[in-house]
Amino acid sequence: MASRIQVDIEKLSRDVAELKAKLNAVILVHNYQLPEIQEIADIRGDSLGLSREAARTNADVIVFCGVLFMAETAAILSPDKTVLLPVKEAGCPMADMITVEGVRALREQNPGAPVVCYVNSSAEVKAESDICCTSANAIEVVNSLDAERVIFVPDKHLGRYVAEHTDKEIIAHEGFCPTHARLTVEEVIKVKKEHPNAAFVAHPECRIDVLRHADHVASTSGMFTYARESGAEEFIVGTETGMLYVLHRANPDKKFYPASELMTCPNMRLNTLEHVVEAMEEIKHVITVDKDIRERARKCLDRMLAIKTPAPQSG
C-alpha cells in the first residue's frame, strides 16, 4: 500500500505535468536538488548547462529548480522567456560574498588585472567582470587571458585550484562555498579507509588540501562523466550529497558514498514539489534582469563561450 507521502508526490508530479503543458514550460533541475524534484525534470545538469539548453527550447516559461544566480543566468540567456524560481529565498551564500563594490575595489587595488568571475555569482557581478568561467573551464579561461595577474571572484578555493595549474598570478577573492568548505582532510582519510577500493572524486570548490587527496577533480557534470566512464565500481563523492542520487540513478550497478554527510546545501533543499506547483499556478517569483545589467553580463558569458575549451560545466 502506497504511503501518503508517495501519493502526495505522485499527485503533485501530475499537477506539474499538467501545468507544464498549459504554460508551455520547461523544468530545469540542478544536480543538487531533492530526488522528487529530480524526477520532474525535463533537463537535469549543472547551472550554466541547464540555462544554455533552455535557451534552445521553444518553451515560453522556464522553471528553474536551483538557486537565484542560476535563474538569473537563464534570464540573461533567454530574455524572451518567463523565468520562475520556485522559492525566492533560495540564494547562494558564496555568490552573496562578492558585490559590485567588491569587484571595483579589487580593480583599484590591482590596476590592469582582468576580472574572472565564477558563474556562481550574481548578474550584477557578471556585468562588472571581464569574463565568466565554470568549475570545468576555469583553468582554460584564465590561461586564455593576455595578462600576468588575474583577479578571480568569488571562490578562493577554486581560485587556488586554478593557481596550481597556471603560471599566472591569481588574486583570489576570499569567498567560498560553505557546503564544500565543510569537507576536511581528516574526513577524507577516514572515508577512504572505510572504502579502500573507491575512487575519490572531488569538486574544485573543496579546500585545496582536500583536492590533493582526490583521484579526480571535477564539476558536477564532470563527475557524472567520470563515474560513467571510469573502470572503478565504487566512488567517494566530494560534493553536495544530492549528487549521489544523480549518480546512483545513472549508474545503478556502481556504489557511491558521501565524503561527508555534512555536505548538504540548505538553500538547494528549499525547493519542493509544492513550491513548484504554486510558482507555476500563480506565475510567482519571476526572475528578471535589467537590460543594462543583462547585456553586460551576457558579454561576460559570451567571452567565455568563445574560448575553445571543454564543454562548459559548473557547480
Image: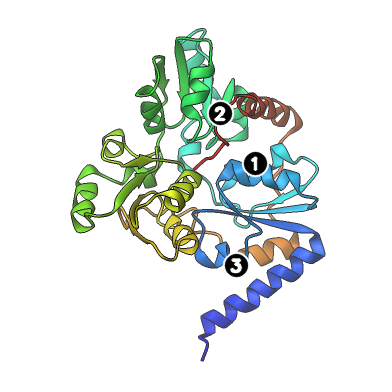
- The residue type indicated by label 1 comes to Glu
- The residue type indicated by label 2 comes to Thr
- The residue type indicated by label 3 comes to Leu
Nearest to the observer: residue 91 or residue 42:
42
Q: Earlier in the sequence, mark 2 or mark 1?
A: 1
In which image quadrant can residue 293 be found? top right
Is residue 65 placed above or below 128 in the rendered structure? below
Q: Secondary structure at mark 1?
A: helix
Q: Which label was assigned to residue 309?
A: 2
In which image quadrant can residue 311 be found? top right
Residue drawn 59% across and 20% down? 130
Residue drawn 42% across and 25% down? 173
Q: Residues within 10 Å of mark 3 (few under 14, many from 20)?
A: many
Q: Earlier in the sequence, mark 3 or mark 2?
A: 3
Nearest to the observer: residue 20 or residue 92:
20
- Viewer can see residue 15: yes
Q: Which residue is mark 1?
A: 72
Q: Residues within 10 Å of mark 1 (few under 14, many from 20)?
A: many
Q: Earlier in the sequence, mark 3 or mark 1?
A: 1
Q: Position of residue 36 (x, y in %)?
A: 54, 68
Q: Secondary structure at mark 3?
A: helix
Q: Which label was assigned to residue 268?
A: none
Residue drawn 50% across and 7% down? 111
Q: Nearer the viewer, mark 3 or mark 2?
A: 2
